[in-house]
Image: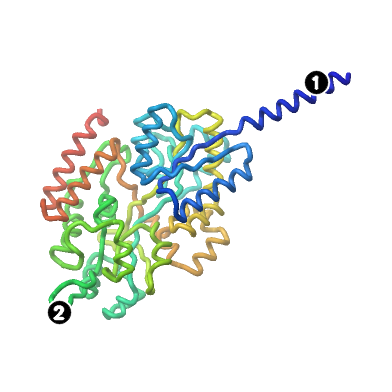
Amino acid sequence: MRRIVRALAVAAALAAGAAQAQTAEISFYYPVAVGGPITKIIDGLAADFQKENPGIKVTPIYAGTYQETIVKALTAHKSGSPPVTSVLLSTDMFTLIDEDAVIAVSDLANSAEDQAWLKGFYPAFMYNSQTGGKVWGVPFQRSTIVLYWNKEAFKEAGLDPNRPPATWAEMVEYAQKLTKRDAAGNVTQWGVQVPSSGFPYWLFQGFTTQNGVELMNPAGTETYFDKPEVVEALQFWVDLSRKHRVMAPGVIEWGTTPRDFFERKTAMMWTTTGNLTNVRNNAKFDFGVAMLPANKRRGSPTGGGNFYIFKKSTPEQQQAALKFIRWITAPQRAAQWGIDTGYVAVTPAAWETPVMKKHVEGFPAAAVARDQLQYAVAELSTHENQRVTKALNDGLQAALTGAKAPADALRDAQREAERILRPFRR
């Protein structure tokens, strides 16, 4: 009898040891360079999750820019050792599906509780997260474009510092009053700045959405770059510098636009709500944040990154990744992530948490991007998305630098996009 008891005890100990040894390991690609405040937040979240879930080890791997991260993730996928999960652009969805790199999250989220969780995100963020009746990406660090303005500059120009421009016409009118020139005629402060490097197509979608037109179909197989409303939108963007002379000519750098705002080189700027914390910490003047001005309608594309789960990971790793993604997008953590970074908290439930309500009460600008979601559209996303986007970006920059007329630039971009997408329309 004692031998049996001892044998059972040994077996139990071995089973416990084996279970402990079978820790699910999740490699997690995150799109940022090593170091800085964001990596500290991600490291802290990974550590907190592991404390609550000792059977799962999360290893964040900082992979550079979004573009560098998807290249690394797909290279690893092709070599047979992809990450278990990664935050990649929501617009990478079709590319990841075409590469057979990811599994539909909705195929893993089988329980009623899982399904309810997937239905809890803002609909605008799901436009770039699902196709073919399945959810492929989970919204995490998402954004829209918003207008920032310098209230002190408004006062100096005789404008109401608490009333941003609500229409294209008003933005031109305000920008004309805000543009300053010295005695020699050199501009010392531009009225408005809309960056055109880095993500020109995304900023352009602000103009096209406001002009009542979208750039692609939901299936990602067609683009509409040469529609008259799209051409009108690009002509307006070009006219800000050429005709109205309220914005610097040529290509305006994405990365330096916030600094130009801080240094009072521009009185208004369009950029991501993801810059909100940066502006709050670095602007030495009172500033405002508003929805983008309307023309035929209000609107902005959504932007930012989703979580994806890679197909070549084990079923255990996939379920562990799903658990981690559910945990990190829970209302309290989604709210804190939004507060810490400036990204839009991705669920209505996150905005109902006490911490977020207190934040918005003290900093109402934080809610602007959320309120703009009702007017938001999907970010440009197609099959062969990087090639299609490059065709449009090249056309936009050709028009903004004066190398091509807007109509010619967009006609050429549309021809290239049609050539690239032809195999997907069969």
Location of the N terminus (image quadrant): top right
Q: What residue type is labelled 1?
A: Ala
What's the residue at 21%, 75% (across, down)? 180
In the foreground, 258 or 372: 258
- Label placed on residue 183: 2
Q: Which of marks 1 and 2 is nearer the N terminus?
A: 1
Looking at the rendered structure, the secondary structure element under dot 1 is: helix
Q: Position of residue 252 (x, y in %)?
A: 23, 58
What's the residue at 50%, 49% (across, down)? 42
Q: Can residue 265 be seen in this view?
A: yes
Q: Which amino acid does label 2 sit on?
A: Ala
For the residues bearing labels 1 and 2, Cβ distance under 8 angstroms? no
Q: In this view, does 3 lie above or below 40?
A: above
Total labels drawn: 2
- The residue indicated by pointer 1 is 7
Location of the C terminus (image quadrant): top left
